[in-house]
């Protein structure tokens, strides 16, 4: 997952930048921009972006179906798994993988992998169709907090025996993994993993940093129940 959208946790403090990331490194071919992904989306615009606000919630069901269909299409289009994308990124840029996310980039689908090497943050884009590294960048925090951010992440991962790659392989039994990031709610360190089911339903899981045990994200389950209650009230 890209540094500017990681959740607001201890790990997010290590990942979220205070400003705009600067592209310093280039691709393996010494190009100034990433290569084009082989997986191009037929309709890469979010369908719900075209919908006007509907206060009475009549379109909620249709929006959910549209989202599920889009989730399914993207998950199926990614022939390269999260674990394989992380492995490819680390082969290109050795270090510690802190997050990975399947995301849209200029109409194409890419795996964005954040790698911490020393005190330096790298973002590596991997083609989800071929496994080829499309480009690499050095992300520098405009506030100069990279070293402090790295220290927070290294502290959270101290004693961990489960890597981001391990977490995605374990969570793959729950569905197609679409993202993984370092999650720490202050009580127990874990990897946060998102999966997409066969019908497009998204689920969130915690994978323990030490044991590798997978548990459902209770906050995610609670949110789902709230959504169902809201729908029944309409």
Image (tube, rainbow, N blue to C red):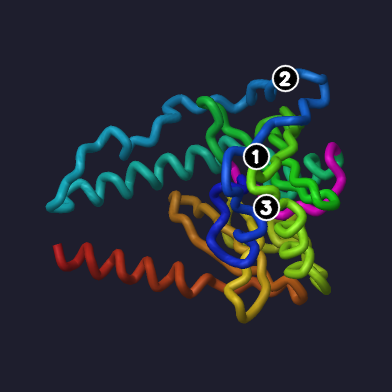
2 vs 1, front mark: 2
2 vs 3, front mark: 2
Q: Position of residue 192 (x, y in %)?
A: 61, 63
Q: Position of residue 96 (x, y in %)?
A: 80, 53
Q: Secondary structure at mark 2?
A: loop
User: Can residue 172 be seen by looking at this rendering?
Assistant: no
Whether 97 is among the magenta residues is: yes
The quadrant where residue 207 appears: bottom right
Label 3: how many Cα within 10 Å (few below 14, some 14–19, many 20+): many
Please report contact status of discs 2 and 1: CB closer than 8 Å, yes or no.
no
Label 2: how many Cα within 10 Å (few below 14, some 14–19, many 20+): some
Label 1: how many Cα within 10 Å (few below 14, some 14–19, many 20+): many
Q: Residue at x 70, y 48 (%)?
A: 144
Mark 3, residue position: 99
* Image vertical order of residue 18 relative to residue 205, above or below: above
Whether 11 is among the magenta residues is: no
Name, please, the residue furthest toward the front: 143
Name, please, the residue furthest toward the bottom: 187
The quadrant where residue 66 appears: top left
Q: Quarter of the image for the C terminus: give it.
A: bottom left
Marks 2 and 1, the one that precedes in the sequence: 2
Q: Position of residue 97 (x, y in %)?
A: 76, 52
Mark 2, residue position: 32
Give the CA separation, mark 2 to mark 3.
Answer: 23 Å
Mark 1, residue position: 111
* Image vertical order of residue 205 relative to residue 143, above or below: below
Q: Residue at x 55, y 43 (%)?
A: 75
């Amino acid at each position: 997952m890209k540094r500017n959208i990681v959740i607001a946790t201890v790990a997010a403090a290590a990942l979220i930048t205070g400003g705009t990331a600067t592209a310093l490194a280039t691709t393996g071919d010494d190009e100034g921009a990433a290569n084009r992904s082989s997986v191009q989306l037929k309709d890469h615009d979010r369908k719900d972006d075209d919908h006007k606000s509907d206060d009475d919630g009549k379109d909620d069901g249709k929006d959910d179906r549209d989202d599920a269909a889009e989730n399914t299409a993207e998950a199926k289009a990614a022939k390269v798994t999260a674990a394989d994308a992380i492995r490819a990124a680390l082969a290109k840029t050795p270090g510690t993988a802190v997050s990975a996310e399947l995301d849209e980039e200029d109409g194409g689908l890419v795996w964005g992998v954040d790698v911490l090497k020393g005190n330096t943050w790298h973002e590596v884009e991997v083609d989800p169709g071929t496994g080829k590294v499309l480009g690499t960048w050095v992300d520098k925090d405009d506030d100069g907090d990279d070293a402090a951010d790295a220290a927070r992440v290294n502290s959270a991962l101290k004693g961990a025996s489960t890597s981001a790659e391990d977490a995605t392989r374990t969570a793959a039994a729950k569905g197609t993994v679409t993202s993984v990031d370092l999650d720490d709610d202050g009580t127990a360190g874990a990897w946060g993993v998102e999966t997409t089911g066969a019908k497009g339903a998204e689920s969130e899981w915690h994978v323990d940093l030490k044991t590798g045990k997978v548990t459902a994200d209770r906050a995610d389950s609670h949110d789902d129940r709230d959504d169902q209650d809201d729908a029944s009230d309409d």
